[in-house]
Image (cartoon, helix red, strand yellow):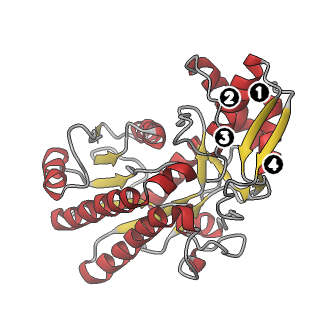
Amino acid sequence: MQQDFTNKRVCVTGGAGFVGRVLCERLRARGASEIFVPRSLDYDLTDAVAVERMYDDAKPDVVIHLAAEVGGIGANQKRPGRFFYANMAMGLHLIEEGRRRGVEKFVQVGTVCAYPKFCPVPFKENDLWDGYPEETNAPYGVAKRSLGVMLDAYRREYGFNGIYVIPVNLYGPGDNFDPETSHVIPALVRKFSEAAEEGQGEVTCWGTGHASREFMYIDDAAEGILAATIAHETSDPVNLGTGREIQIADLAAMIAKQCDFTGRIAWDDTRPDGQPKRQLDTTRAEERFSWTAKVSLEAGIPRTIAWWKAHAPRTTAQEPVNVSS
Protein backbone atom coordinates (compact mmCIF):
# COMPACT_ATOMS: atom_id res chain seq x y z
CA MET A 1 0.00 0.00 0.00
CA GLN A 2 0.94 3.63 -0.38
CA GLN A 3 2.44 5.40 2.63
CA ASP A 4 -0.61 7.62 3.09
CA PHE A 5 -4.34 6.96 2.94
CA THR A 6 -5.40 9.73 0.56
CA ASN A 7 -8.37 8.58 -1.55
CA LYS A 8 -8.78 5.45 0.58
CA ARG A 9 -12.06 4.61 2.27
CA VAL A 10 -11.11 3.05 5.60
CA CYS A 11 -13.49 1.21 7.92
CA VAL A 12 -12.25 0.97 11.52
CA THR A 13 -14.39 -1.30 13.69
CA GLY A 14 -13.98 -0.22 17.28
CA GLY A 15 -12.89 3.16 15.95
CA ALA A 16 -14.63 4.99 18.82
CA GLY A 17 -12.83 2.88 21.42
CA PHE A 18 -9.56 3.09 23.30
CA VAL A 19 -7.23 2.08 20.46
CA GLY A 20 -9.57 3.17 17.69
CA ARG A 21 -9.70 6.85 18.59
CA VAL A 22 -5.93 7.17 18.43
CA LEU A 23 -5.72 5.06 15.29
CA CYS A 24 -8.28 7.24 13.51
CA GLU A 25 -6.31 10.36 14.45
CA ARG A 26 -3.19 8.82 12.91
CA LEU A 27 -5.12 7.82 9.78
CA ARG A 28 -6.33 11.40 9.33
CA ALA A 29 -2.76 12.63 9.73
CA ARG A 30 -1.86 10.34 6.83
CA GLY A 31 -4.49 11.80 4.53
CA ALA A 32 -7.52 9.61 5.22
CA SER A 33 -10.59 11.80 4.77
CA GLU A 34 -13.18 9.00 4.57
CA ILE A 35 -13.08 6.95 7.77
CA PHE A 36 -16.15 4.92 8.61
CA VAL A 37 -16.61 3.92 12.26
CA PRO A 38 -19.52 1.51 12.76
CA ARG A 39 -21.20 2.02 16.13
CA SER A 40 -22.58 -0.97 18.02
CA LEU A 41 -26.02 0.63 18.31
CA ASP A 42 -26.25 0.75 14.52
CA TYR A 43 -24.42 -2.43 13.52
CA ASP A 44 -24.31 -5.65 15.52
CA LEU A 45 -21.12 -7.09 14.05
CA THR A 46 -21.91 -10.56 15.41
CA ASP A 47 -24.82 -10.66 12.92
CA ALA A 48 -24.07 -11.46 9.27
CA VAL A 49 -26.92 -9.31 7.94
CA ALA A 50 -25.74 -6.29 9.93
CA VAL A 51 -22.20 -6.80 8.64
CA GLU A 52 -23.47 -6.85 5.04
CA ARG A 53 -25.30 -3.59 5.72
CA MET A 54 -22.16 -2.09 7.23
CA TYR A 55 -20.19 -2.92 4.09
CA ASP A 56 -22.97 -1.43 1.96
CA ASP A 57 -22.72 1.81 3.93
CA ALA A 58 -18.94 1.96 4.36
CA LYS A 59 -17.81 0.77 0.90
CA PRO A 60 -14.30 0.33 2.31
CA ASP A 61 -11.02 -0.14 0.50
CA VAL A 62 -9.36 -1.09 3.80
CA VAL A 63 -10.86 -2.66 6.93
CA ILE A 64 -9.05 -2.49 10.28
CA HIS A 65 -10.87 -4.75 12.73
CA LEU A 66 -10.29 -3.57 16.30
CA ALA A 67 -13.73 -4.21 17.79
CA ALA A 68 -13.76 -6.84 20.53
CA GLU A 69 -15.60 -7.92 23.62
CA VAL A 70 -12.88 -8.14 26.23
CA GLY A 71 -12.10 -7.53 29.88
CA GLY A 72 -9.81 -8.46 32.74
CA ILE A 73 -9.50 -11.91 34.20
CA GLY A 74 -12.69 -11.53 36.27
CA ALA A 75 -14.74 -10.62 33.20
CA ASN A 76 -13.24 -13.55 31.28
CA GLN A 77 -14.19 -15.92 34.09
CA LYS A 78 -17.77 -14.65 34.17
CA ARG A 79 -18.41 -14.56 30.41
CA PRO A 80 -16.24 -17.17 28.62
CA GLY A 81 -19.03 -18.23 26.27
CA ARG A 82 -19.95 -14.72 25.25
CA PHE A 83 -16.33 -13.70 24.76
CA PHE A 84 -15.69 -16.68 22.48
CA TYR A 85 -18.88 -16.23 20.47
CA ALA A 86 -18.78 -12.48 20.05
CA ASN A 87 -15.15 -12.27 19.01
CA MET A 88 -15.34 -15.30 16.73
CA ALA A 89 -18.59 -14.18 15.09
CA MET A 90 -17.45 -10.59 14.47
CA GLY A 91 -14.24 -11.64 12.78
CA LEU A 92 -15.85 -14.48 10.85
CA HIS A 93 -18.52 -12.28 9.25
CA LEU A 94 -16.23 -9.32 8.62
CA ILE A 95 -13.54 -11.41 6.92
CA GLU A 96 -15.98 -13.38 4.75
CA GLU A 97 -17.88 -10.29 3.65
CA GLY A 98 -14.61 -8.46 3.02
CA ARG A 99 -13.51 -11.30 0.77
CA ARG A 100 -16.80 -11.23 -1.11
CA ARG A 101 -16.52 -7.47 -1.59
CA GLY A 102 -12.88 -7.61 -2.70
CA VAL A 103 -11.51 -5.18 -0.10
CA GLU A 104 -7.92 -4.15 -0.77
CA LYS A 105 -6.68 -5.06 2.70
CA PHE A 106 -8.11 -6.52 5.90
CA VAL A 107 -6.25 -6.01 9.18
CA GLN A 108 -7.18 -8.30 12.06
CA VAL A 109 -5.93 -7.19 15.49
CA GLY A 110 -5.35 -10.27 17.62
CA THR A 111 -4.39 -10.72 21.27
CA VAL A 112 -1.43 -11.82 23.35
CA CYS A 113 -3.95 -14.04 25.20
CA ALA A 114 -3.77 -16.40 22.20
CA TYR A 115 -0.27 -17.57 23.16
CA PRO A 116 0.18 -20.84 25.10
CA LYS A 117 0.10 -20.57 28.87
CA PHE A 118 3.69 -21.74 29.27
CA CYS A 119 5.11 -20.24 26.10
CA PRO A 120 8.89 -19.65 26.28
CA VAL A 121 9.80 -16.01 26.87
CA PRO A 122 10.01 -13.97 24.73
CA PHE A 123 6.97 -15.19 22.80
CA LYS A 124 7.81 -15.79 19.13
CA GLU A 125 5.11 -15.91 16.47
CA ASN A 126 6.10 -19.46 15.54
CA ASP A 127 5.22 -20.59 19.10
CA LEU A 128 1.57 -19.57 18.77
CA TRP A 129 0.28 -23.13 18.34
CA ASP A 130 2.62 -24.89 20.77
CA GLY A 131 0.09 -25.20 23.59
CA TYR A 132 -3.26 -24.15 25.05
CA PRO A 133 -3.71 -20.57 26.30
CA GLU A 134 -4.02 -19.69 29.99
CA GLU A 135 -7.36 -21.15 31.05
CA THR A 136 -9.08 -18.05 32.40
CA ASN A 137 -8.90 -16.21 29.06
CA ALA A 138 -8.56 -19.17 26.68
CA PRO A 139 -12.01 -18.81 25.01
CA TYR A 140 -11.21 -15.22 24.05
CA GLY A 141 -7.67 -16.10 23.00
CA VAL A 142 -8.68 -19.13 20.92
CA ALA A 143 -11.37 -17.14 19.11
CA LYS A 144 -8.85 -14.48 18.15
CA ARG A 145 -6.23 -17.07 17.23
CA SER A 146 -8.69 -18.82 14.92
CA LEU A 147 -9.20 -15.62 12.92
CA GLY A 148 -5.51 -15.63 12.05
CA VAL A 149 -5.95 -19.14 10.67
CA MET A 150 -8.96 -17.98 8.68
CA LEU A 151 -6.98 -15.16 7.09
CA ASP A 152 -4.14 -17.50 6.16
CA ALA A 153 -6.61 -19.92 4.58
CA TYR A 154 -8.35 -17.12 2.68
CA ARG A 155 -5.05 -15.83 1.33
CA ARG A 156 -4.11 -19.30 0.06
CA GLU A 157 -7.50 -20.12 -1.47
CA TYR A 158 -8.82 -16.72 -2.56
CA GLY A 159 -5.79 -14.43 -2.62
CA PHE A 160 -7.45 -12.32 0.07
CA ASN A 161 -5.00 -9.76 1.45
CA GLY A 162 -5.56 -10.16 5.18
CA ILE A 163 -2.93 -9.62 7.86
CA TYR A 164 -2.83 -10.48 11.56
CA VAL A 165 -1.06 -8.45 14.25
CA ILE A 166 -0.72 -9.38 17.93
CA PRO A 167 -0.36 -6.44 20.32
CA VAL A 168 0.74 -6.98 23.89
CA ASN A 169 -1.23 -5.52 26.84
CA LEU A 170 -2.06 -1.88 26.09
CA TYR A 171 -2.50 1.15 28.35
CA GLY A 172 -2.69 4.92 28.20
CA PRO A 173 -5.04 7.92 28.39
CA GLY A 174 -8.63 7.01 27.60
CA ASP A 175 -8.28 3.42 28.81
CA ASN A 176 -11.09 1.51 30.52
CA PHE A 177 -10.91 2.20 34.26
CA ASP A 178 -14.07 0.30 35.25
CA PRO A 179 -13.32 -1.85 38.35
CA GLU A 180 -15.17 -4.84 36.88
CA THR A 181 -13.64 -4.96 33.41
CA SER A 182 -10.38 -2.98 33.38
CA HIS A 183 -6.96 -4.46 32.72
CA VAL A 184 -3.84 -4.24 34.85
CA ILE A 185 -2.54 -0.68 34.59
CA PRO A 186 -5.86 1.20 34.68
CA ALA A 187 -7.01 -1.01 37.55
CA LEU A 188 -3.91 -0.16 39.55
CA VAL A 189 -4.01 3.53 38.65
CA ARG A 190 -7.60 3.88 39.80
CA LYS A 191 -7.14 1.93 43.00
CA PHE A 192 -3.95 3.68 44.14
CA SER A 193 -5.23 7.13 43.16
CA GLU A 194 -8.44 6.68 45.14
CA ALA A 195 -6.58 5.16 48.07
CA ALA A 196 -4.16 8.09 48.18
CA GLU A 197 -6.98 10.65 48.02
CA GLU A 198 -8.89 8.92 50.84
CA GLY A 199 -5.86 8.25 53.04
CA GLN A 200 -6.29 4.48 52.97
CA GLY A 201 -3.52 2.51 54.64
CA GLU A 202 -3.68 -0.59 52.45
CA VAL A 203 -4.55 -1.67 48.91
CA THR A 204 -5.16 -5.34 48.11
CA CYS A 205 -4.31 -6.71 44.67
CA TRP A 206 -5.20 -10.04 43.08
CA GLY A 207 -2.68 -12.86 42.96
CA THR A 208 0.85 -13.12 44.30
CA GLY A 209 2.45 -10.26 42.37
CA HIS A 210 5.00 -12.72 40.96
CA ALA A 211 3.52 -12.90 37.45
CA SER A 212 5.11 -10.69 34.83
CA ARG A 213 3.66 -8.72 31.94
CA GLU A 214 4.69 -6.49 29.06
CA PHE A 215 2.81 -3.25 28.38
CA MET A 216 2.68 -0.97 25.34
CA TYR A 217 1.53 2.64 25.26
CA ILE A 218 -1.52 3.34 23.12
CA ASP A 219 0.26 5.68 20.68
CA ASP A 220 2.85 3.00 19.93
CA ALA A 221 0.08 0.47 19.31
CA ALA A 222 -1.66 2.75 16.81
CA GLU A 223 1.58 3.40 14.95
CA GLY A 224 2.39 -0.32 14.86
CA ILE A 225 -1.02 -1.23 13.44
CA LEU A 226 -0.71 1.46 10.77
CA ALA A 227 2.84 0.40 9.87
CA ALA A 228 1.59 -3.17 9.40
CA THR A 229 -1.39 -1.97 7.36
CA ILE A 230 0.92 -0.14 4.99
CA ALA A 231 3.80 -2.57 4.66
CA HIS A 232 2.94 -6.11 5.85
CA GLU A 233 1.84 -8.31 2.96
CA THR A 234 1.76 -11.91 4.23
CA SER A 235 -0.49 -13.89 6.55
CA ASP A 236 2.34 -14.50 9.03
CA PRO A 237 1.29 -13.15 12.44
CA VAL A 238 3.36 -10.23 13.73
CA ASN A 239 3.91 -9.26 17.38
CA LEU A 240 3.63 -5.62 18.44
CA GLY A 241 5.22 -4.82 21.77
CA THR A 242 8.11 -3.21 23.63
CA GLY A 243 10.16 -6.30 24.44
CA ARG A 244 10.27 -5.27 28.11
CA GLU A 245 8.84 -7.46 30.87
CA ILE A 246 7.99 -6.27 34.41
CA GLN A 247 6.83 -8.20 37.45
CA ILE A 248 3.36 -7.17 38.62
CA ALA A 249 4.61 -6.43 42.13
CA ASP A 250 7.18 -4.01 40.71
CA LEU A 251 4.57 -2.42 38.46
CA ALA A 252 2.24 -1.94 41.43
CA ALA A 253 5.01 -0.30 43.44
CA MET A 254 5.83 2.03 40.52
CA ILE A 255 2.22 3.11 40.09
CA ALA A 256 1.63 3.46 43.84
CA LYS A 257 4.61 5.81 44.11
CA GLN A 258 3.47 7.95 41.17
CA CYS A 259 -0.05 8.13 42.64
CA ASP A 260 1.44 9.29 45.99
CA PHE A 261 0.12 6.23 47.80
CA THR A 262 2.31 5.56 50.84
CA GLY A 263 0.39 2.69 52.45
CA ARG A 264 0.88 -1.06 52.30
CA ILE A 265 0.35 -3.18 49.17
CA ALA A 266 -1.22 -6.54 50.08
CA TRP A 267 -1.62 -9.55 47.80
CA ASP A 268 -4.62 -11.90 47.80
CA ASP A 269 -3.07 -15.19 46.71
CA THR A 270 -6.47 -16.91 46.68
CA ARG A 271 -7.06 -15.02 43.42
CA PRO A 272 -5.45 -16.24 40.18
CA ASP A 273 -2.27 -14.74 38.73
CA GLY A 274 -3.33 -15.57 35.18
CA GLN A 275 -0.59 -16.39 32.68
CA PRO A 276 2.76 -16.65 34.51
CA LYS A 277 4.81 -14.55 32.09
CA ARG A 278 4.22 -12.39 29.01
CA GLN A 279 6.87 -10.80 26.85
CA LEU A 280 6.90 -10.62 23.06
CA ASP A 281 9.73 -11.01 20.60
CA THR A 282 9.23 -8.04 18.27
CA THR A 283 12.00 -8.85 15.79
CA ARG A 284 9.58 -9.66 12.98
CA ALA A 285 7.85 -6.25 13.15
CA GLU A 286 11.20 -4.48 13.02
CA GLU A 287 12.40 -6.58 10.10
CA ARG A 288 9.16 -6.60 8.09
CA PHE A 289 8.10 -2.96 8.42
CA SER A 290 10.75 -1.14 10.45
CA TRP A 291 8.57 -0.57 13.51
CA THR A 292 9.63 -0.38 17.16
CA ALA A 293 7.81 0.96 20.23
CA LYS A 294 9.10 4.26 21.58
CA VAL A 295 7.26 5.13 24.83
CA SER A 296 8.66 3.61 28.03
CA LEU A 297 6.59 2.72 31.10
CA GLU A 298 8.35 5.50 32.97
CA ALA A 299 7.02 8.00 30.41
CA GLY A 300 3.62 6.44 29.70
CA ILE A 301 2.36 5.77 33.21
CA PRO A 302 2.49 9.42 34.40
CA ARG A 303 0.49 10.44 31.31
CA THR A 304 -2.07 7.75 32.10
CA ILE A 305 -2.34 8.81 35.74
CA ALA A 306 -2.74 12.47 34.74
CA TRP A 307 -5.56 11.56 32.33
CA TRP A 308 -7.35 9.51 34.99
CA LYS A 309 -7.11 12.26 37.59
CA ALA A 310 -8.59 14.73 35.11
CA HIS A 311 -11.50 12.44 34.20
CA ALA A 312 -12.09 10.33 37.31
CA PRO A 313 -15.61 9.95 38.71
CA ARG A 314 -15.84 10.64 42.40
CA THR A 315 -16.51 7.07 43.52
CA THR A 316 -14.65 4.50 45.57
CA ALA A 317 -14.01 0.85 44.68
CA GLN A 318 -13.30 -1.20 47.80
CA GLU A 319 -12.86 -4.62 46.13
CA PRO A 320 -9.38 -6.08 45.59
CA VAL A 321 -7.99 -4.83 42.31
CA ASN A 322 -7.71 -7.33 39.43
CA VAL A 323 -4.16 -7.18 38.06
CA SER A 324 -3.99 -10.63 36.48
CA SER A 325 -4.75 -10.06 32.80
Circle 2: element type: helix
Q: Which amino acid does label 2 sit on?
A: Ile
- Crowding near pointer 4: few (<14 within 10 Å), some, many (20+)? some
Q: What element carries label 1?
A: loop
Identify which amino acid the numbered label 1 is placed on: Cys
Quick check: 152 left or right of 72?
Answer: left
Mark 1 highlights which residue?
259
Looking at marks 2 and 1 on the same chain, the residue that comes earlier in the sequence is marked by 1
Determine contact: label 4, label 2, CB under 8 Å: no
Q: Earlier in the sequence, mark 4 or mark 1?
A: 4
Query: Are the two marked residues, 2 and 1, in contact with CB atoms closer than 8 angstroms?
Result: yes
Residue at 59 percent of width and 45 percent of height? 183
- Nearest the camera: 195 or 310? 195
Which residue does the numbered mark 4 point to in the structure image?
A: 249
- First along the sequence among labels 3 and 4: 4
The nearer-to-camera label among 2 and 1 is 1
Task: From the image, tell me which residue sits under label 3.
Answer: 321
Q: Which of the two discs, 2 and 3, labels the residue nearer the N terminus? A: 2
Q: Is residue 184 visible?
A: yes
